[in-house]
Image: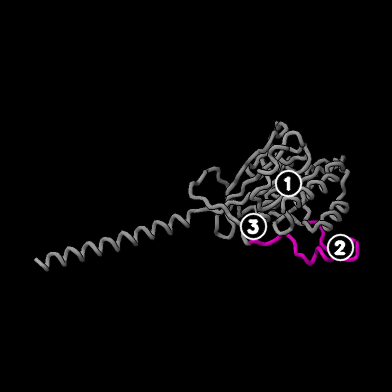
Amino acid sequence: MNLFFRTQFTFRKMDDTTKQKTGSSRREVSIKKQKRIFKIIVIGDSNVGKTCLTFRFCGGLFPMKTEATIGVDFRERIVEIEGEELKLQLWDTAGQERFRKSMVQHYYRNVHAVVFVYDVTKIVSFESLSHWIEECDQYQLTTTIPRVIVGNKCDCTDSISVNTNMAQKFADLHNMPLFETSAKDDSEADHVEAIFMTIAHKLKNSKPMMSPLLHKQGTLDGTVSQSSGVISVGKSHAREAKKSNSVDENELWCAC
């Protein structure tokens, strides 16, 4: 009888150990499935093409019909960076104050990166960038997180009122890289892709977009350095993206 009870106890002990190992394995698999989520806000005046940029990156197309964003528009895409899947959430807010007033605090919460957009054919939208940068600074969205400036609608070559040199001086002054592209032109699609993929790389590795040293070089003597140049947005990042509209319940908010 004693032998029987001892054998039964041994089997139970082995069974409990097996369950513990199985549970541990399931937890490990669950952790591997979790994706880090990064919130990227896209801001700028009305009609600069914020919605079209996010639509081009997340949907791969240029929307033929768009209406003024009321409140906040939201799109997302899963990309693969160095073997890790990241979910990029692009928040597009209304440029008009009357549409965004009640949403400001929610919009600027838990932000990981900022994209400032202006229309290269409208000097007023470029001049408004200072206002948008100041607003971000008020909510502590400073250069500690990736921030970029995007000049959109470069396909309108006959109507350009903000030249590259002018925009680059402003970008250098605020220690941000400058991108120039067109959400409408299909030949520029890889450029739009590269903008957000560059941000994704920085977010994955928790790195700022620009070196602090560059900022010092640009403001030390009250002038702006011309050494940085416009950021080249080649096609190399486009191959690394994986499009997906599926929603995974096992997700993890990134607190970087």
Residue 180 appears in view: no
Dot 2 corresponds to which residue?
219
Q: Which residue of the protein is positioned furthest toward the right in this rendering?
A: 222
Of labels 3 and 2, earlier in sequence is 3
Q: Which residues are magenta?
A: 206-230
Which comes before the other along the chain, label 1 or label 3?
A: 1
Identify the main secondary structure in magenta.
Answer: loop
Snapshot quadrant of residue 90: top right
Q: Amino acid at mark 3?
A: Leu
User: Which residue occupies the foreground of this view, 190 or 230?
Assistant: 230
Drawn side of residue 235 relative to residue 5, left or right: right
Q: Quadrant of residue 16?
A: bottom left
* Magenta region includes residue 227: yes
Q: Position of residue 219 (x, y in %)?
A: 86, 62
Name the residue tied to disc 1: 188
Q: Residue at x 82, y 55 (%)?
A: 171
Query: Of marks 2 and 1, which one's residue comes earlier in the chain?
Result: 1
Q: Nearer the viewer, residue 194 or 224?
A: 224
Q: What quarter of the picture does the C terminus occupy?
A: bottom right
